[in-house]
Image (spheres, rainbow, N blue to C red):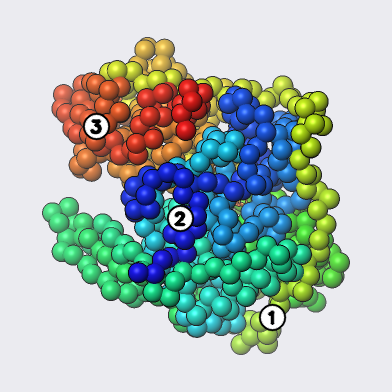
């Protein structure tokens, strides 16, 4: 039987385990990337492991997130990263050089290689045929040191693309369509693999938009084949020699995906599955209304796609742009690692050339890289933007991570980004829609939600065709190469006062006596747990950053989560967080585990936990437990005292533990769904201790 592309690359990199979906595997990592908001911790942990030099083929440290430089913290981080990265044998992409995923695609991405990045959008590299996975900084530090990356061998979900996108319909609409089918829930342990004749028409940046936002599906990664379009891109980047043709076998068999969905509440999702998937079966709902839905693969006829948007406040709230027609738009932002390529921005520049932004709209443009920005500057497109009234933002994450451009109260903001979690823009109650550059630029011109296809019908604007440049502007001056080993020996590490050694984990107690500090609902993202925006600058200082854990749930005048947690810790009890489905969605930020650990949290009790976050919890010795019966979630409340006898022993092999709610006087079973290596890490008191003890 033929093999998927995913398994071909995994097989080549397998160092431990069997390629059997659901079992734990260890894979060799060829390349790593870190960014400044996660990278300082990653490098501090690398130092703590006593590893003097990276052992990968390529490791790159990017600076792109914390760029506002209010106070000394950001610049301290930049200088630390510059000094440690080059000393330890990594490339350093200086601030101003662009967003890590865009730059990595341009300058380092290689078909068939593995990439591990301390950022959840690392799967962007799948657009060039890599197995590119997001992980916590500690996992990336281990990989930089030459260690394998351990993960669950995935099920591979096939997405067959047919036909060709029509004018004004974009790659963003493909991934938004996928989000309407798969949602952000219940896809842990899958890889999305694109195939079919429709792939051929999509250039690498369009593919990268799809794989980038695969992160929002919660899958391990997404991947496209490497073909003539990949070669074209690599040649234009001056790296034609790195091309390799890669594809699944013609008779490759994709996995069936089985999901439990609520027959009534998820009726729209089930309808989408019926419409867009092959071989669908929908079981009868059980007593709780949950039905088993299974399907073979997703089939998207690109000709049939229409412009879509993700409505507030989740990337899977998908609506047709046409249905929003007439809604006033106050702000349009074009950029982020999802849609800031040369082609994306050229399309917008051509539409805006000789025209003006609607007076009711603020338009911001953030080119994804210095390469993109320099090319726009040289060919005059930048001037077209400026003359149209756009505000030019530097090549960085910027507004995507709440660094400026927060919208006014009640304002509608359209962004070409990948996340619209509530409050991520920096404004409480924000109304943020995620759209393609085509839809964004249409709104910038008209001042309202406008199906971009109407630009042709109503305004006579033809959809610009932006071809792949024959040669991109190549200038790697802002990419500092690693110092040669001899020079590196004497090089100094610049360590500002705001860079504080992160705490390491402790072993779990034999019996856990805990207290529920907070109970939260479904789809709690790492932005809820550890806010970014103005708090982002404290990433290198855990004691300070920890003050803001669950900041969005703190109430004025009442003790904060941090204060309550520290009181519980002082009383000799373990802190426990209780959550619903999909706990820890979104980013890879390990601070969402590291800071709660610092405050004494020792267990998370949830209905389901997302992949990267679960790994981060384990890495920092917080025990991830899931309710064996999801109905028990409703019975446990904040402030309840919990007792888990024998937890310390159970983590080595038990599948379930019994949790006693001492306050209410009842017991309930919880699952310990851990891979064998995760059990060892937990038993050692976290990954740092495990590695120091010689664990692999
Ligand atoms: C994000 O998009 O949320 C981030 C900021 O890039 C994060 C990483 C971080 O929190 O530093 C991510 O996606 O992993
Ligand atoms: Fe940066 Fe936004 Fe991409 Fe995260 S999603 S890496 S914040 S641009």
Of callouts 2 and 3, the N-terminal one: 2
Secondary element at tag 3: loop
Q: Residue at x 56, y 63 (%)?
A: 129
From the image, which quarter does the N terminus lie in?
bottom left
Secondary element at tag 2: helix
Q: Is residue 658 visible?
A: yes
Give residue 87's quadrant in the image.
top right
Q: Nearer the viewer, mark 2 or mark 1?
A: 2
Q: Residue at x 69, y 84 (%)?
A: 461
Residue 669 location in percent, x, y? Answer: 19, 34
Which disc, if any, is residue 11?
2
- Judge by depth and name the residue closer to the eye, 470 or 27: 27
Cβ–Cβ below 8 Å for labels 2 and 3?
no
Q: Is residue 278 above or below residue 669?
A: below
Which disc, if any, is residue 607?
none
Label 1: which residue? 465
Q: Nearer the viewer, mark 3 or mark 1?
A: 3
Label 3: which residue? 654
């Amino acid at each position: 039987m033929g093999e998927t592309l995913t398994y071909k690359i995994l097989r080549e990199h397998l160092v431990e385990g069997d390629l059997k979906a659901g079992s734990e595997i260890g894979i060799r990592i060829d390349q790593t990337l870190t960014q400044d908001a996660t990278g300082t911790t990653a490098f501090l942990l690398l130092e703590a492991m006593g590893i003097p030099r990276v052992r990968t083929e390529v490791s790159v440290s990017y600076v792109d997130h914390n760029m506002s430089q209010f106070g000394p913290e950001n610049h301290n981080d930049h200088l630390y990263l510059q000094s440690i990265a080059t000393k330890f044998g990594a490339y350093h992409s200086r601030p101003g050089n662009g967003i890590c995923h865009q730059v990595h695609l341009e300058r380092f991405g290689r078909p068939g290689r593995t990439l591990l990045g301390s950022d959840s959008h690392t799967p962007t590299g799948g657009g060039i045929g890599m197995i590119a996975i997001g992980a916590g900084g500690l996992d990336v530090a281990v990989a930089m040191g030459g260690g394998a990356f351990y993960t669950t061998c995935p099920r591979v979900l096939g997405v067959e693309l047919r036909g060709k996108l029509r004018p004004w319909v974009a790659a963003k609409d493909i991934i938004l369509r996928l989000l309407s089918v798969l949602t952000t829930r219940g896809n842990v342990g899958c890889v999305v693999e694109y195939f079919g004749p429709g792939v051929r028409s999509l250039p690498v940046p369009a593919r990268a938009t799809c794989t980038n936002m695969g992160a929002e599906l919660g899958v391990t990664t997404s991947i496209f084949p490497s073909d003539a379009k990949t070669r074209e891109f690599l040649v234009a980047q001056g790296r034609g020699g790195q091309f390799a043709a890669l594809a699944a076998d013609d008779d490759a068999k994709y996995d069936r995906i089985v999901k439990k969905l609520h027959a009534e509440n998820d009726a729209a999702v089930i309808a989408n599955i019926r419409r867009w998937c092959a071989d669908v079966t929908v079981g009868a709902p059980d007593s709780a209304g949950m039905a088993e839905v299974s399907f073979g693969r997703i089939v998207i006829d690109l000709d049939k796609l229409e412009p879509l948007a993700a409505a507030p406040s989740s990337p899977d709230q998908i609506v047709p742009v046409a249905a929003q027609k007439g809604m006033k738009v106050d702000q349009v932002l074009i950029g982020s690692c999802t849609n800031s390529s040369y082609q994306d921005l050229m399309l917008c520049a051509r539409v805006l050339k000789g025209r003006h932004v609607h007076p009711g709209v603020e338009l911001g443009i953030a080119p994804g890289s210095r390469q993109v920005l320099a090319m726009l500057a040289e060919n005059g497109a930048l001037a077209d933007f400026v003359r149209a009234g756009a505000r030019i933002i530097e090549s960085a994450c910027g507004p995507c991570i709440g660094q400026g451009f927060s919208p006014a109260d009640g304002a509608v903001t359209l962004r070409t980004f990948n996340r619209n979690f509530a409050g991520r823009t920096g404004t409480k109650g924000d109304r943020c829609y995620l759209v393609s550059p085509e839809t964004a630029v249409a709104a910038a011109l008209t001042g309202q939600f406008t199906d971009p296809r109407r630009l042709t019908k109503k305004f006579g604007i033809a959809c610009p065709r932006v071809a792949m440049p024959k040669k991109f502007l190549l200038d790697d001056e802002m990419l500092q190469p690693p110092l040669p080993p001899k020079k590196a020996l004497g090089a100094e590490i610049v360590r500002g006062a705001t860079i504080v050694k992160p705490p390491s984990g402790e072993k779990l107690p034999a019996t856990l006596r805990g207290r529920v500090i907070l109970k939260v609902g479904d789809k709690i993202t790492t932005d809820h747990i550890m806010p970014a925006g103005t708090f982002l600058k404290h990433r290198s200082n855990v004691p300070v950053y920890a003050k803001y854990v669950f900041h969005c749930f703190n109430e004025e005048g009442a003790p904060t989560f941090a204060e309550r947690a520290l009181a519980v810790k002082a009383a000799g009890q373990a802190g426990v967080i209780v959550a619903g489905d999909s706990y820890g969605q979104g980013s890879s930020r390990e601070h969402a585990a590291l800071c709660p650990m610092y405050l004494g949290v020792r267990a998370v009790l949830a209905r389901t936990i997302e992949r990267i976050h679960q790994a981060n919890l384990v890495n920092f010795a917080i025990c991830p437990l899931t309710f064996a019966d999801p109905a028990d979630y409703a019975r446990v409340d904040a402030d309840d005292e919990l007792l888990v006898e024998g937890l310390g022993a159970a983590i080595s092999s038990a599948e379930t533990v019994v949790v006693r709610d001492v306050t209410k006087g009842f017991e309930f079973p919880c699952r310990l769904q851990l891979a064998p290596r995760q059990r060892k890490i937990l038993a050692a008191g976290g990954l740092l201790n495990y590695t120091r003890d010689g664990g692999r």
